[in-house]
Image (cartoon, grey):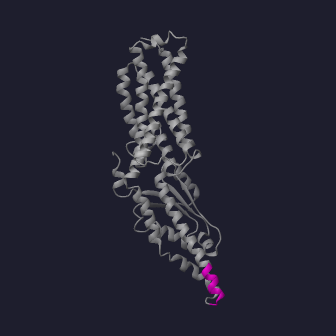
Amino acid sequence: MVFQPLWTSTPFTIDIAVFDEDKGEFSKILLEEVFGSGQLKDMVKIKYVESEEEIINEVNKGKIAAGVIIGEEFSQAIMTGEDTRIKILTDPEQPIKAGVIKNIVEAFTLEVLKRRIILGTSMGILVAKNLINPAEIQQLIPVWLSEIENIDELIRMDKKTEKRMDKNPMAMEYYAVGMGVMYILFATNAGAETIFQERRNKTLERIKVAPVSEREILGGKLFGIFLIALLQFVMIVFFTAIFYRVKWGDSILGIIIMILSSVLAFSGLSTLLASLTKSEEQIGNIGPALAMIFGFMGGGMWPAFAFPDWLNMVSKFTPNRWAIDGFLKLMYQEGGVVSILPEVLVLLSMAAVFFSLGVFRLRTKGVKVD
């Protein structure tokens, strides 16, 4: 696999921003003892900010994978048994890294909640038996709760998440998406070549004898390109799911929508390419080269989260990037239809632009025998 070293080498770094309004005992435990532990300090790079707006700005620019916002009196709320929460803002374009941070914070909050419940019950018993002075409770709670002896267990849990990203199944899942998406363009390019083949074989001339319009001929040809690519991509999804245990997501409707929108975008791109080339040989040479370039730039050969900023920006001009991001949301964020709407809308917009330009040029050139 071209990009498998990313999963088998040392852990990649995760950039996060933290806005700590609390600055209490429990925010210190999370930031210093959990994120600052020996297992995580080299992987999680923390940037401290002064407002939630700064975090939103950093996320929107793609500079961080996640932002952690610890509200005022977070520690006090834990000690008094009141409801409190930690807010996490994530970059949807870095789902794997954001997921790691989310898992760490969720595990921490669950552990603290568990200890709070245990201590609440224990306190009631101790006070009832006059084994402790009620006035001392507020002073003792921080000490007892801060001694979370199974922080090592919490860290091990996150190391499992990290290791899962180091194993072949994770690499295979990403590889299946990246290569599958890139293959769509090869398939649609092969379909677009048939336009020139029919010119060469004089079959277009025979088709035009039938009582059908030029629009119907062209529409049928383009629909055939779409249908063949769709069937081939569906076969890829089923094959990888059955033989390589690739889980494409829990939302069947989301998977169907992503498949349809992706194939539409690539069919449109191949239509545009066919309209810009002059011969079967040209599209046969340019098409595969374009598929390889788009495959790399879109994150099919190398994960987009490892891209430098400039390449990350450029990759968003390819349908590959939006298709891969959409499938990754379904696979790793347990997303549904709503979560993939941005990717679907971009892919459908690309399809509309590509088809419009391609059909216009083909009709201008004339669907006829040269």
- In this rendering, would 214 be left or right of 315? right
| Front-most of residues 227 and 311 | 227
The residue lying furthest to the bottom in this view is: 130
- How many numbered circles does the render carry? 0
* Magenta highlight on residue 125: yes
* Magenta highlight on residue 291: no
At x 52% / y 11%, what residue is drawn? 210
At x 50% / y 77%, what residue is drawn? 147
Q: Main secondary structure of the magenta part?
A: helix
Position of residue 286 relative to residue 107, above or below, is: above
Q: Position of residue 61 (x, y in %)?
A: 51, 48
Can the viewer see residue 308 in this picture?
no
- In this rendering, would 256 be left or right of 120? left
Q: Position of residue 256 (x, y in %)?
A: 53, 39
The residue lying furthest to the front in this view is: 242
Position of residue 368 relative to residue 190, above or below, is: above
In the rendered image, which quarter is residue 182 located in?
A: top left
- Please give the range of residues in magenta: 121-130
Can the viewer see residue 194 in this picture?
yes
Q: Position of residue 117 (x, y in %)?
A: 60, 74
At x 44% / y 59%, what residue is drawn? 161
Q: Position of residue 366 (x, y in %)?
A: 48, 14
In the rendered image, which quarter is residue 370 located in?
A: top left
At x 42% / y 21%, what residue is drawn? 194
